Amino acid sequence: MRLRRLRLLNDFKSLTAFDHEFRGPQKAVKAVAPVCLAGLNGSGKSNVIEAISEIFCHLELTLLDYEEVTTRAKETELRFEIDYDLQIAGHDPRRIRIRKDSKQGARFYDLTDEDEEQEMTAWEEQVGSLPTRILGYSSGLNETISAVFGANQYWYSEEVGQAARTDRSRNVDHTRTLYMDYDNNAAIAVVNYLFASEDEKQLFRERVRIDDVHSFRIAVHLKRPNGKAVETTPEIDDSVKRLKRCAAVAWYDEGQLLWTFDFFVNDATRNAFLDQFKSASQLFVTLYKLWLLNSLALDRESRRFYTRPTVRKGLIERPPTVPLQDKIFALTRLRLRIEKPRCVIDYAGISDGEHQLLHVFGTITMFKEPNTLFLLDEPETHFNPKWRVDFIHTLNQIAEKREQEFVLSTHSPFLISDCRQANTFQFRRDNGDISVKQVSFETFGASFDYLLAQLFDLPAMISNQAIEELREIIHRDNLQEMLAAVPRFGDSLEKRFLYEKIAQHPDNQTAVGELNPKEGA
């Protein structure tokens, strides 16, 4: 998949008259070349990811064959036109355009034939023109991104509940939209270490201390806090049975309707999961569906959180949470084998950066399907500088040969230096007004200091406190004060101005090289 253009026909959040092609003229690039949205906090870059999320979640919800979805839930105030390519094995890409310019439903067009719009009216054609999966991620509490995904998951849960009550034989298709919430972090780690190839495991080992998963527990508690039993479908029952077949130890509390499964990871465990679930994405989606049952522990009004208009409009509200003891599904007691020193630790013992690396790259590793769209809002915020420099390279190690699309927002020059000019957009906020433009210079391979100066208005490469003190000392032009200041500041290009000022002072008898032979050379 390749995202080509997004045109917003009405204002969306801070975006006004947004109309941009995401892939300008460029030479053929075999490597992953993500759409990069660069800018400071509050510059509007995340609003683009929110808009794309809103578009595809809306389209998915309107096309799903769900009986429970209300007419109001299928509405959106957003008016848009979006173009993208779908990769077809053995054929040229299909160019798709979807336009919604009124309260009426969106219209779907095939542009493959020399950009001539051929409208697709059949439901099967419209469904087939959507990305295989749409995966959302945000490093922070960005509820305006998670809310639209959460609404789709809410309606899926409602549909499953209705099927469990009235027609247990009915299969409910799961939405192709998934929000990779932090609550799924442990499941992402488990699934990756169960299914990853040796090359994929080595990729993780080179970056984090984790050698493997040691053990974990899954509990499925089919009794709500109010004492009522959870009504299940054959799919849920089958998922529990398959987990039981993979467990080293399994026991059942009939009074509590509680299944508890303990897993000790070895080759036999991996073979069992491979036999029962076939792929990493299938296992993760199974666990994700069971995780959605946790909403049943909430009262009905709390469960409707993601359908509230205030949430969809971005007002600050936090999703309701379920205490561990009340959860219908829980993955706990996750233990990891780590190296240096070789020992077994609790999952909570690894750092925030290690959690985020497993979360982001684990998600990408699991979902291999072509035409998958990844929407990543600041995916590197907890990474150290070395991991940030390596981000796009790691992305290519995982996904270079896949036909997938990545849209990411960032304020890190470490990522931007590996992104192409044709796909990189600068966001600015000036006196409340947002401006967006394609970057005017080649970003690929650009130095970090150049990117900071051009995109983030940071001409100096040292912190403000140090630069202000340095400027004041130079401005006072007192030779003794300047000489005394030399050892107080670390080496930098900015410190060079201090040396030059000392060398030019009429009372100075000391050569710059004598002050600091390394810098004076």
Image (tube, grey):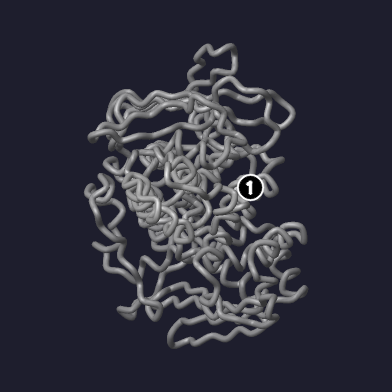
Q: How many other residues sit within 10 Å of disc 1, few (<14), some (14-19) or many (≥20)?
A: some
Residue at 27%, 30% in the rendered image: 11
Residue 64 is at least partly visible in this image: no
In the rendered structure, the answer to whether residue 96 lies left or right of residue 190 reads: left
Q: Is residue 446 above or below residue 274?
A: above
Residue at 53%, 58% in the rendered image: 383
Figure label count:
1
| The quarter of the displayed image where residue 298 is located | bottom left
What residue is shown with label 1? 395
Q: Is residue 118 above or below residue 132?
A: above
Q: In this view of the protein, which residue sits in the foreground, 114 or 260?
A: 114
Residue at 40%, 51% in the rendered image: 479
Residue at 60%, 38% in the rendered image: 371
Residue 499 lies, in percent from the top left, at 49, 47
Residue 116 lies, in percent from the top left, at 52, 11
Residue 78 lies, in percent from the top left, at 31, 33
Helix, strand or loop at label 1? It is helix
In the rendered structure, the answer to whether residue 391 lies left or right of residue 271 reads: left
Q: Amino acid at mark 1?
A: Leu
| The quarter of the displayed image where residue 161 is located | bottom left
Residue 173 is at least partly visible in this image: yes
Q: In this view of the protein, which residue sits in the foreground, 25 or 57?
A: 25
Residue 374 lies, in percent from the top left, at 53, 44
